[in-house]
Image: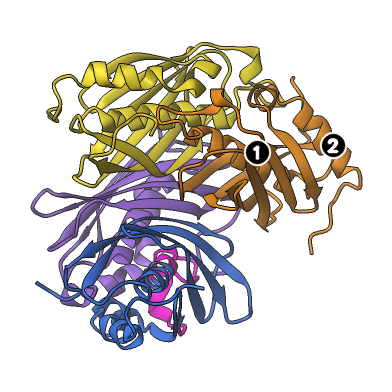
Chain colours: A orange, B yellow, C blue, D purple
Amino acid sequence: MNAPADPYYVARIRSSFGRQKAMALIGASLTVVEPGHVELALPYRDDLTQQKGFIHGGIIGMIADTACGYAAFSLMPADCSLVTVEYKINILAPARGSLVARGEVLRPGRTLTVTRGEVYSEDGKHVASMQQTLMMLAGTPDTPE
Amino acid sequence: MNAPADPYYVARIRSSFGRQKAMALIGASLTVVEPGHVELALPYRDDLTQQKGFIHGGIIGMIADTACGYAAFSLMPADCSLVTVEYKINILAPARGSLVARGEVLRPGRTLTVTRGEVYSEDGKHVASMQQTLMMLAGTPDTPE
Amino acid sequence: MNAPADPYYVARIRSSFGRQKAMALIGASLTVVEPGHVELALPYRDDLTQQKGFIHGGIIGMIADTACGYAAFSLMPADCSLVTVEYKINILAPARGSLVARGEVLRPGRTLTVTRGEVYSEDGKHVASMQQTLMMLAGTPDTPE
Amino acid sequence: MNAPADPYYVARIRSSFGRQKAMALIGASLTVVEPGHVELALPYRDDLTQQKGFIHGGIIGMIADTACGYAAFSLMPADCSLVTVEYKINILAPARGSLVARGEVLRPGRTLTVTRGEVYSEDGKHVASMQQTLMMLAGTPDTPE
């Protein structure tokens, strides 16, 4: 439905994700990169948990935010960067085990893009739902200044 | 204004925070614990950044979520646990350097509590604002089952 | 997928909607009532507009909130009432003409239910997207005290 | 703290509010217009209620959305218009009687402005809290096309 503006969007997103040191810290990897649709995998690790032994809600937010952001980025031209304006996430169930986060573009826009994200646990449970707004910064590189 | 239901709330929160392995992973520490008000500090680390070298938005969400959650938890009775129902965060500015997250109870409730959180960078810049909803689980321990 | 707990849920929702004087004020009507899925129609009226002649964003929020709330209510037992805890709405495009609001249950729960809503204009444009949290009040009538 | 870019911002806002037919429909009026701070009053009317006799949550959202929007608009230059990107509202308590909505600018921006809003009932009860994002459309009149 959405055609990517940059034919090299997959390589651009893989390179950008590779520069996200916070994703390396938590052990997340990029598993699906399609136009307007991106998925991440987060293998279970004990050091990602909160006080009750579930995956920390903030970690769930991190992977949903990132999947949604790259779903939006997949439709952007090559010479831009993207910032998260805001997101809202509902934690639907406590998360144990490995997780998958899926981001989808709900409405692409010239300046603002709206996305939705879902997080599932490996047993198929729906763990979280996000709605997010991003802003494109035209002519701004997606690299450190 | 808000009196804690549990006189030992500071020890209870410090112990709970100490069990949050995800907070140890990112290097966050608890700096202020008062009734309805909790602050965290997050020293800058290179491995907390995203592709442009700023602190990852999801990390900002993590510390705001945690500060707000413990602000709510400070007013709760001893024999309960608390889950994040949802939160919404606006990223107001790109974050460099060390961060402080402040959580405040907006409206305490028997079942649901609503909080607000702010994140500031060490140069005083307002980095993010959160509005969050939590649910108390009465008679449920705040420890792994 | 979701079975209604009350076989008379359609009559219960039509009666409840009929008591919503604010829906009569704006001219909204209930068009679809299914388990976990409710739709409203809002015919265009000049007195629903904002300063630029578009339908007021708050009116869009009203019909999305109501459609989502009744989607949740369709799965509830007969002797309860439901309150909106919170909602988040993105306005995706300015709205002209008549509108349709669709609410769907994302995750039904004993205490909390999470829903999503979409608003479309008569020309098929996607106008708004909502994510909402509701709380069931067991044993509380859905009528004035 | 925030200086208005347009010295005639009060007249501009009063004129814009006067064109909001949806505000006339529900009987809301503009009571305070200051730089970055706007308040509305909504006298109680039976036709603003939901099925239990409380003020409809969508009506509460409407006045909070409008107060926040004009708080942002007060800091904008004369030749622009403003659109609501999204908002999130927590309903803190059921609302009876007349209401006041207060909007405040949290962070003014060239493109995006973030605001917060509070709604109180006449007995001083805190009824709702909003966090909202708006986008300025430069060189676009705040009037019907």
Q: Residue D144: give x, y in percent of width and height.
A: 52, 69
Q: Nearer the viewer, residue D8 or D142?
A: D142
Q: Nearer the viewer, residue D127 or C46?
A: D127
Determine which of the numbered discs, if any, sits on residue A66 in the image.
1
Q: Is residue A37 left or right of residue B57?
A: right
Q: Nearer the viewer, residue D55 or B82?
A: B82
Q: Residue B111: give x, y in percent of width and height.
A: 23, 47
- Parent chain of label 1: A
- Parent chain of label 2: A
Q: Nearer the viewer, residue A66 or C129?
A: A66
Residue C73: quadrant of the picture = bottom left
Span shown in magenta: C42-62
Residue shown at 35% from the left, 86% from the top: C10
Q: Residues within 10 Å of mark 2 (few under 14, many from 20)?
A: some
Which mark is in front, 1 or 2? 1
Q: Residue C113: give x, y in percent of width and height.
A: 38, 60
Determine which of the numbered discs, if any, sits on residue A12 in the image.
2
First along the sequence among labels 1 and 2: 2
- The answer to whether residue C138 shows anywhere in this view is yes
Q: Residue B125: give x, y in percent of width and height.
A: 47, 20
Q: CA distance from mark 1 to mark 2?
A: 15 Å
Residue shown at 17% from the left, 68% from the top: C139
